[in-house]
Amino acid sequence: SPRWMLSLKNSMIIGVSATILSMVLGTLASLGLAQWKSKFKPLVLAIVLSPVVVPGVITAVGLYFFFAPLGLTGSYSGLILAHTALCTPFVVITVSATLQSFDMNLSRAAASLGATPMVGFRRVILPLILPGLASGALFAFATSFDEVVIVLFMAGPEQRTLPREMFAGIRENISPTITAVAVVLTIISVILLASMELLRRRNERLKGNPHG
């Protein structure tokens, strides 16, 4: 029905947008934290990762009271920013794990050969951290696509996502549509897990054969 198709469209728009933003922010944060030597680094890292630790209801309430005076509740922009805050920690975790085995001397060597910071990142750093970045992007998309608590607090009638529509359908009446949507979500989850497993195997092959 048009209602369910609109919910699926909203989930895809918000999920893809939040994933892209979290990839950019998470990668920048990971690179900065990897090179930053300070006693405040654990505190900053804890703040960055706090959306993963803090219960979802508390995060949703905090985001609502923060975004409401800015007029961002009931809008796509507000939902995308809220989901980005929720998804970014997953990118930070996976990219930071990849950077543990990354030799920063490679980027310094690129700079000594005349590469600009952007060229050095694109030609040297990005290819090596790409498996971690891709895994983080998959986790981020899955988190955004499955999120319902923040949507309950912040979404308007036009921003109802698929999990929000399922929640309303279960509460109001049980229909075969909910079962069909659950099957679709299960298939999407299996595809994401299979993609992460393929990325993991590819990363192991690259580590075992760096010239391959």
Image (spheres, helix red, strand yellow):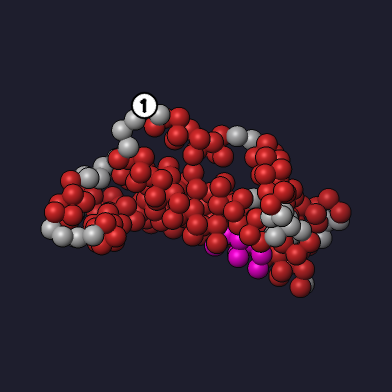
| Stretch in magenta | 9-16
In the image, 173: left or right of 98?
right
Residue closest to the far bottom:
2
Residue under the image location 45 percent in, 30 percent down: 43
Residue 183 seen in the figure: no
Left or right of 34? Residue 53 is right
Residue 76 in picture, x, y percent from top left: 66, 61
Dot 1: within a 10 Å radius of its alpha carbon, few (fewer than 14), some, or many (20 or more) residues? few
Can you say whether 40 is above or below 33 in the image? Answer: above
The C terminus sits in image quarter: bottom left
What x and y, as percent, mark residue 6? Answer: 71, 69
**In what element is the residue under mark 1?**
loop
The quadrant the N terminus occupies is: bottom right
Residue positioned 35% across, 54% down in the render: 131
The residue that mark 1 highlights is 39
Q: Amino acid at mark 1?
A: Lys
Report the residue that reaches farthest toward the right.
Answer: 172
